[in-house]
Image (cartoon, rainbow, N blue to C red):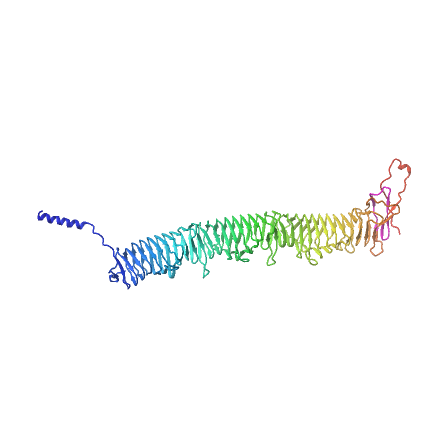
Amino acid sequence: MSPRYRARLRTCLITAAALLPFPAALGATLTWNNSTGDWQLGSNWVPPGPPGAADIAVINGGNSQLNAPATIAGLTQTAGTLSGTGALTVTGASSWTAGTQSGAGTTQFDGTLAVSGPGAKSISGGRSLNLQGTTTWGGNTANNNNAISFAGGTINNSGSFNDQNAFSTALSHFSGTNTFNNTGSYTKSGNSTTTIGIAFNNTGSLAINAGSMLLNGSTHSGPISIGSGASLEFRNGTNTLNGVTVSGAGTLVISTDNVGADGVPSINGGQVDTAFLLSGGPLYGTAHTINGTATWTGGSIRGDGAGDFEVTSFNNDLTISGAGTKGIYLGRTINLNAVTTWTGNTGANNNAISFSNGGTVNNNGTFNDNNGFDAFIEHSVGGPHNFNNAGTYNKNGNSVTTVDGGVAFNNAGTVNINAGTFRPSGGSSTGSFVIAAGATLDFRNGNSTLDQATTSGAGLLMISSDNVGADAIVTVNGGSHTTAFTLSGSTMNGADHSFQGPVSWTGGAIAGDGTGGFESTTFTNDVSISGAATKTLQAGRTLNLQGTTTWSGNTANNNNAIRFWNGATLNNNGTFNDDNSFNAFVEHNVGGPHNFNNVGTYNKNGSSVTLFDLGVNLNNTGQFNVNAGTVQVVNAFDNQGSISTADAATFATTSTSVDLQNHGILQGTGTYDPAAGRAVINAGEVRPGTATTVGSLTMAGNFSQGAAGLFQVNLASLAAFDSMDVLGNLALAGVLQVTSLGGYNPVLGDSFTIITFDDGVVDATDLAGSFGSIAAVGFDPALLFEVLYLDHSVVLTVAAVPLPPVWPLAGTALAALAFRARRRRS
């Protein structure tokens, strides 16, 4: 080869070599020399630096100050500080086992980052860590080591952050403003507790697969999943879920540490499909749904107080338990759509459900009230407050549940009182109440309305009073009521209604509306009216008594009164037993008209005085038996039924302006006593004894029988016959009916003193008139009775029947009845 050719070939090879790619230099590992100095100063590194894009920087101590942008392949920090205002980009794998990231600059990890070991890590001075790759936080060796402390710092995770610590640890707040922003994925897989004491903002995804994550201030708009056995807990700070779906088999927890102010968690929309536990603190937010099983042991659920009536819906089973009060505040509405169990209080009146400044519970499912001790659904302040039952409410605990005044209990579904006492204090109900044997539904306070509602079962419906503040007003508009019923206090009113079970009335009032509607209360079963308290009928109410009523048990004169006020009527259509041992009143308060109508049977049995007061009209069209004691009537009285007085018993009228009128039957062996100077006026029938027995009857004043009247005398023998003693003047007209008992026929010359009279003053008014006719019933037709009118007696005698001429009687029978009257003789 010629030299010229050889030279050309060399030139070509050199040129070709220059055009080939030059292999990159291999990266080095540069270690900071533990001084405090400038990152960019090469002498601060061993070997001399600064680190380049392919190098790995190691900081084991000192303070490396980076105030300009730099890129390296990896960062290993075991101690010391990385500080400054510069932006450090790390493209490869890195590790952080201890030390501080500080200053206003940023550290961006594009590759993997391992945060591990027991050493303390801190971010301060405005430093931001941008995590772009996969970050693994794990490997701590005991509780609370491998923690990251913030004193003015931010972590921005846009990659994958794997929280794998086996022991509990924290992202802790020391000072300043501190934030963890998750736009990527944060996965907690260590079976421990991670406490995040700084602001945690999640717009990416958060997965708690094991253990517990405790957030003390956060905002979420990305999805959250919680694995089985794991929990996400909001304890302190402000935690907000905005339209988030929380899923998984774990538990979302809202709690409190009872140190300082509680957290302020808000769930704005979205849904919680995990189990849910509210154990403390308040829960706020717009409408949201809890689809997982829920437990409420403390804390409150609150609206915003602006009248927006935000809704929390529990679509799965809910347990309300423990001693703590559960609050529903500031207009919050809670919808219970599955099975709710309220249980486990540890003493009387703890585990209360408390309403304050507006709140509503809508039970659309089944609500089981299982508390073993007395419990409250209570009002604190403000309102309105409502517990609306559209599903089934079961009172199962053998205790007292009080729905406090200020909370309306509205039942459109079914309430089963299976044990204990259920005590609403207001509200309106159209549904049913089923009361088991031994259980009680008690209306004691507030205004409650039963609007075509039903009460049934073997238990007790009660309207009572605690005598503290205003009594209850219970409005019963129709419906069906077959339970036993006790009215012991307060007021019952409403449209026409009836009670089919046995009734006990020991206090309180039954009222109309006062507008003249004359609403009726009908007791179709037996009624007991007892005890010392006054019983009031008022404002136009009509009370119908259809069964056996027993009025008894007063403890002193004039208590256990039946009082009429501003118009009222009592209709006794059954049997009314007046058994009071002490004097008793059927009394008038004010207004009227007031009527006690006896259509059935009234039995005065107690050996005391019963007074029908001025302003109360006693109207008798039935049977009125004074078996003992005295009945006194102040108003004008006109008997249209039957009255019977027993030995030593008295029926009296006390008004000196009216007579005792009779258009029915007066009978018996006792006394009829008109007021002084007044008379018993008979336009009906008077019978000493009864229609089939003999007896002696007393008229304690004057007696006057008109033309329409009938005086019946039974004759059983010369020694057994009816008689009447008039302690005043006697005026006669009408019919004397003489009736044979047992087929008795007196003989000629027999005489019977049937009336005695004497007012103690001999004058022309002692006796006036005579019977207009004599009717003999049941005697031999051959008997003839005549009446002798003596100075102080009326005597019935047997006279001879005069024989008529023979020819008029031929072919005929002797007339069965003959009459003769003989005028007074001295």
Left/right of residue 643 with respect to residue 95 in the rendered view: right
Could you tell me residue 758's position as x and y percent?
Answer: 83, 54
What range is drawn magenta here?
768-794
State the residue in front, 584 or 172: 172
Residue at x 86% of width, y 37% of height = 813
Left/right of residue 622 with respect to residue 79 in the rendered view: right
Left/right of residue 691 with respect to residue 481 in the rendered view: right
Left/right of residue 746 with respect to residue 540 in the rendered view: right
Could you tell me residue 270's position as x and y percent?
Answer: 43, 50
Tag count: 0
Q: Quadrant of residue 374?
A: bottom right
Could you tell me residue 396's position as x and y percent?
Answer: 56, 51
Extreme residue toward the bottom, this view: 36
Extreme residue toward the left, this view: 2
Could you tell me residue 502's position as x and y percent?
Answer: 65, 49
Q: Quadrant of residue 130?
A: bottom left
Q: Is residue 781 magenta?
A: yes
